[in-house]
Amino acid sequence: MVHDARLSTRVLRAAGILAVLTWSLAPILLVVTSAFKEPRQIFEVPFRVFFIPTAENFETLARLNPEFFSGLRNSLIVTVFTVLLTLCASFGAGYVYARTKETAYKVSAVFMLVVRMLPPIVVTVPLFPVVNWLALNDSHLILILLYAAFYVSLGAWMMRSFVAQIPIELEEAAAIDGATLWQVLRLVVLPLAAQGLVALTLFVVVFAWNEYVFAMIFTMNNARTAPVVIGEMLSTAEGVQWGAVFAAATIQLVPVVLIVLALQRFLIAGLTAGAVKS
């Protein structure tokens, strides 16, 4: 009887895992496999599982939409500098929030989190005339500043959780030995909070690489990112080249998937930060 119950539990668990994997991976597999099919095979009914892979869609993408590759370059520039700026600001803010008990700091931390929960379009529209006045439209700088500002709130809370788990006695011992605040941060806190920084890096990379709303509103030609170019490929007057769209989506997908797979254990650490105190 007990054996039957355990078997039923295992079967249900396996069925649940299979359902989740199917739900999560099916759209990705559909995009990737469609990128390597001939255009006439993409929307065939019934769905074609076995086919001879072709690079035709990638050639079409390079011929008809060369701006996609400049969009990839822009996405890379914006993502790298957004990560650097967000890490610096989040680490400093997280340290202050973790070590300071004053009410004003707690209120500001909650306010930052509330702003993060607002839909991006609510924050974006009032900024548009300001960005125009500063002549920052269609530049990498405005995207870097907006992305970092939008993600520092969550980053500060993440780093606050990681820093709070570091015993303050370590910092006090370093201070007694004559270390300055900068040396304490650099030599004591930063190495112990490295796992949190990697987790935050992963979150910011995924966000900045795929962000669409800010990039669509504030860029036109020079700083257009890859998601915006893909969006434009879906609204051409000549008709949508679905093979090229799937090829672009596959190229856009690859870096993020590789980074997530390489750093997945830090992603879990970031999601559970603060859930367990040592």
Image (cartoon, grey):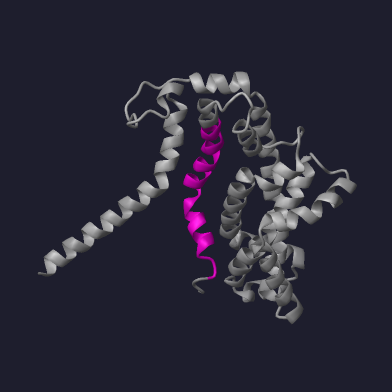
Question: Measured along the vertical axis of the image, is residue 44 above or below residue 215?
Answer: above
- What residue do we see at 75% from left, 53% from top? 124
- What residue do we see at 58% from left, 53% from top? 203
User: What residue occupies the far left of the structure in this picture?
Assistant: 1
Q: Position of residue 142 (x, y in %)?
A: 78, 46
Task: Identify the image quadrant of residue 109.
Answer: bottom right
Magenta: main secondary structure equals: helix
Q: Is residue 88 visible?
A: no
What segment is highlighted magenta in the picture? 248-274
Task: Identify the image quadrant of residue 90.
Answer: bottom right
Q: Quadrant of the N terminus?
A: bottom left
Compare residues 186 and 200 and report the one nearer the observer: 200
| 19 magenta-colored | no
Residue 166 left/right relative to 30: right
| 258 magenta-colored | yes
User: What residue occupies the far right of the structure in this picture?
Assistant: 133
Question: Measured along the vertical axis of the image, is residue 274 above or below residue 137?
Answer: below
Compare residues 163 and 90 and report the one nearer the observer: 90
Question: Measured along the vertical axis of the image, is residue 144 above or below residue 199?
Answer: above
- What residue do we see at 70% from left, 80% from top? 101
Q: Position of residue 39 (x, y in %)?
A: 46, 23
Question: Measured along the vertical axis of the image, is residue 182 above or below residue 261?
Answer: below
- What residue do we see at 31% from left, 56% from top? 16
Residue 182 left/right relative to 269: right
Q: Position of residue 73 (x, y in %)?
A: 67, 33
